[in-house]
Image (cartoon, grey):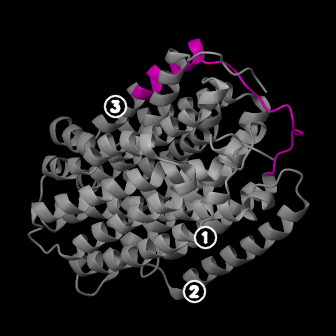
């Protein structure tokens, strides 16, 4: 499986963190730049939506498969391959003269996202001493959360002063530095416990099911009802086939033992709801502020800087005071702030009062701080180091499913409302309020007080 380092390997940890930052910050960077990209490349809003969803579909479909490949062939090798995919896509995007090329390259960006998400947590854990593995998972979650939160302000400044192509050069720089540090300093690890089986059929069926569902949502109103119904039929048939195939698979992409674990499942659902909210807000708010309220891209970044500020301060506070047995109360409190954030979006009109936007983003930042780390810790508290890659992949796949649906439904509601984008934006906010309220209910139903003492630090178990 690979040795756990007896002391901290700082250069390796830094390299892994930079890789995580590269893939995590890319989504908000991309969304802040979308209005500018669509304008300069004379693209339609629905084409901009496909930039987001191709990235998400590929990321979701391949997470578990590459988690298993990382377990088999080595997490370091697979992580570096993910960095290479991301770097290739960033170069192509930065040089692109067509929206179609950018959409196509999202395949490689999504692949890099899937690879690095699935391998990074296990790599991070193995760079810490055994008794500090909880800190490793906490650092992993904190880096992702802060990267997502910092994306809008970084993107606003880059696009505003250097142009939209600069976001791709920025991510490329992070990926290259990460590659150097990981190749030179990171230790290799594998899973020698399980047989080397891949669920190729499961991967194909997940891609078909999710891709056809997202296609039906995104293209609703653009294509005839026959195409939409056909796409939904493909989704249903693929899902039914997936359930049947997974029952016979040696190493299924859908782990029944994980999905039947109430604590893991509820934590994953909560995380999925948070990512639904995150992808929706990161996609819709910049579009609304730039296209309806006529903010500049720099102004968008400035008002959204109040999103990461709570993350910076609260992540450390939550990390010190957090007790896994009380996780459900932290998570439920976070979803209360998420409801507040979405409710404030309802108060926005065409002028988009900056104070309301700031209050909404600050509430969002508090919500993320309270939900992200505790949810991740609870989810992995019942899993095993030997199966770290595929377990993380299963958890992250459910997250990515939420993100894909958030982007697809959010923009569909915003662009298809008869009263225009503002009315549709409010419809999307109502959907977020309902789902965040559901998150409160799911969190409070979690039996986190039953987590055993030996699993309080996140290690992965069969």
- Please name whichever residue, 335 or 97, is drawn nearer the observer in this view of the structure: 335
The disc at residue 170 is 3
Question: Residue 415, located in which quarter of the rendered image?
Answer: bottom left
Q: Is residue 285 left or right of residue 55?
A: left
Residue 362 in the image, given as x and y percentages of width and height: 25, 56
Please, what secondary structure does the residue beneath circle 3 have? helix
Q: CA distance from mark 2 to mark 3?
A: 43 Å
Local crowd size for mark 2, using a 10 Å CA cut-off: few (<14), some (14–19), many (≥20): few
Question: Residue 67, located in which quarter of the rendered image?
Answer: top right
Viewport quadrant of the N terminus: top right
Label 1 or label 2, whichever comes before in sequence order: 1
Q: CA distance from mark 1 to mark 2?
A: 13 Å
Residue 176 in the image, given as x and y percentages of width and height: 46, 22
Residue displayed at 24% across by 63% down: 360
Q: Is residue 361 left or right of residue 89?
A: left
- Please name whichever residue, 21 or 291, is drawn nearer the observer in this view of the structure: 21
Q: Which residues make up the magenta segment? A: 174-199
Residue 402 in the image, given as x and y percentages of width and height: 52, 64
State yes or no: discs 2 and 3 in contact (Cβ < 8 Å): no
Q: Is residue 184 magenta?
A: yes
Q: Is residue 346 magenta?
A: no
Please, what secondary structure does the residue beneath circle 2 have? helix
Disc 2 marks which residue? 226
Q: Is residue 413 left or right of residue 82?
A: left
């Amino acid at each position: 499986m690979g040795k756990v380092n007896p002391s901290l390997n700082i250069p390796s940890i830094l390299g892994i963190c930079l890789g995580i930052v590269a893939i995590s910050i890319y989504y908000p960077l991309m969304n802040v730049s979308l209005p500018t990209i669509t304008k300069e490349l004379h693209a339609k809003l629905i084409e901009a939506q496909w930039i987001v969803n191709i990235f998400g579909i590929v990321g979701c479909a391949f997470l578990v498969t590459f988690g298993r490949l990382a377990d088999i062939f080595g997490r370091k090798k697979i992580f570096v391959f993910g960095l290479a995919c991301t770097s290739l896509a960033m170069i192509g995007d930065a040089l692109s003269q067509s929206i179609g090329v950018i959409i196509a390259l999202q395949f490689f960006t999504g692949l890099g996202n899937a690879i690095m998400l699935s391998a990074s947590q296990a790599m991070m854990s193995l760079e810490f001493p055994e008794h500090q593995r909880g800190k490793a998972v906490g650092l992993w979650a904190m880096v992702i959360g802060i990267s997502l939160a910092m994306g809008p302000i970084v993107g606003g400044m880059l696009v505003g002063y250097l142009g939209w192509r600069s976001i791709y050069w920025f991510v490329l720089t992070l990926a290259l530095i990460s590659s150097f540090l990981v190749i030179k300093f990171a230790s290799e690890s594998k899973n020698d416990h399980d047989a080397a089986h891949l669920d190729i059929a499961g991967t194909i069926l997940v891609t078909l099911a999710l891709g056809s569902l997202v296609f039906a949502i995104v293209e609703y109103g653009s294509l005839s009802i026959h195409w939409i119904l056909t796409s939904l039929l493909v989704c249903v048939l693929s899902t039914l086939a997936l359930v049947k195939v997974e029952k016979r698979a040696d190493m299924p992409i859908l782990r029944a033992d994980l999905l039947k674990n109430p604590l893991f499942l509820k934590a994953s659902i909560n995380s999925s709801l948070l990512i639904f909210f995150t992808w929706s807000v990161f996609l819709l708010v910049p579009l609304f502020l730039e296209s309806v309220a006529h903010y500049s891209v720099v102004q968008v970044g400035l008002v959204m800087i109040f999103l990461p500020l709570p993350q910076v301060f609260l992540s450390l506070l939550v990390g010190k005071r957090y007790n896994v047995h009380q996780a459900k109360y932290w998570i439920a409190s976070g979803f209360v702030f998420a409801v507040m954030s979405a409710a404030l979006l309802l108060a926005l009109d065409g002028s988009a009062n900056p104070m309301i936007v700031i209050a909404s983003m600050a509430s969002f930042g508090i919500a993320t701080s309270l939900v992200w780390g505790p949810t991740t810790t609870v989810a992995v508290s019942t899993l095993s180091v030997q199966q770290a890659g595929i377990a993380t992949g299963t958890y992250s796949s459910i997250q990515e499913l939420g993100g894909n649906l958030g982007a697809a439904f959010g923009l569909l509601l915003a662009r298809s409302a008869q009263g225009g984008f503002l009315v549709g934006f409010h419809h999307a906010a109502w959907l977020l309020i309902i789902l965040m309220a559901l998150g409160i209910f799911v969190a409070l139903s979690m039996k986190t007080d039953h987590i055993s003492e030996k699993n309080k630090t996140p290690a992965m178990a069969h």
